[in-house]
Image: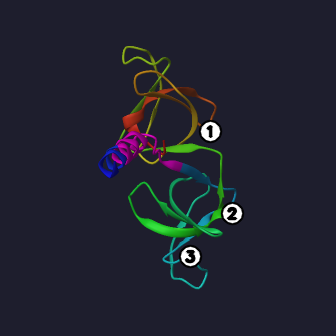
């Protein structure tokens, strides 16, 4: 009986592994200070500009441990982040297209490091995005970070 429970437990664990999804938030209206510890007494590591997406790795009280596009880990107060979603271009000259297709017209090209507002996921690895200038289109999910 205990072997059966073990097998069921392992099966449930493996089935739920696919349910893990990265949680991203965006730096709010003011730049966020990133610390080496979950306290303002910790060393200040970076100042992150507003609108920058960060991956939430861990929540500890009023603090969150975050990962940035470079993969660096640090702590920031949870109140510094907002639920609004942005993504950052991680390749040179990412093509944002009119439709979810490589053959579709290029609406604009975004340089590495450009922030884009996240729209809804498209089909086959395409994501709808919008530039702050109002231009919108679809970009390959592999060309951006923050989803």
Mark 1 / mark 2, whichever is N-terminal: 2
Residue at (41, 17) in percent of width and height: 101
Nearest to the eye among marks 1 and 2: give it.
2
Image position of 18 (left or right of 39): left
> Crowding at label 2, few (<14), some or many (≥20) Cα neighbours within 10 Å?
few
Kind of element beneath mark 3: loop
Report the magenta residues as a range: 8-23
| Magenta stretch contains residue 18 | yes
Checking the image for residue 38, the label placed there is: 3
- For mark 2, what is the residue? 79
Query: Residue at 48% of width from left, 17% of height from top?
Result: 99
Relative image position of residue 9 (x, y in whole percent): 38, 47
- Rendered image: mark on residue 80: none
Q: Quadrant of residue 11?
A: top left
Q: Residues within 10 Å of mark 1 (few under 14, many from 20)?
A: few
Q: Quadrant of residue 92?
A: top left
Does residue 123 appear in this view? yes
User: Alpha-carbon distance for marks 1 and 2?
Assistant: 23 Å
For residue 93, say whether it is visible: no
Looking at the rendered structure, the secondary structure element under dot 1 is loop
Left or right placement of residue 11 versus residue 133 in this view: left
């Amino acid at each position: 009986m205990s072997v059966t429970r073990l097998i069921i437990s392992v099966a449930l664990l493996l089935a739920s592994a696919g349910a893990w999804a990265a949680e991203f938030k965006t730096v709010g209206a003011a730049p966020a200070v990133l610390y080496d510890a979950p306290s303002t007494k910790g060393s200040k590591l970076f100042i992150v500009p507003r609108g920058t997406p960060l991956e939430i790795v861990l929540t500890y009280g009023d603090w969150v441990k975050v990962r940035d596009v470079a993969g660096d880990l640090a702590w920031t107060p949870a109140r510094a982040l907002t639920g609004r979603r942005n993504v950052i271009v991680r390749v040179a000259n990412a093509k944002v297209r009119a439709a979810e297709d490589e053959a579709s017209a290029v609406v604009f090209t975004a340089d590495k490091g450009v922030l884009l507002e996240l729209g809804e996921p498209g089909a086959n690895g395409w994501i709808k995005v919008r530039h702050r200038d109002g231009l919108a289109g679809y970009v390959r999910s592999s060309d951006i970070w923050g989803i």
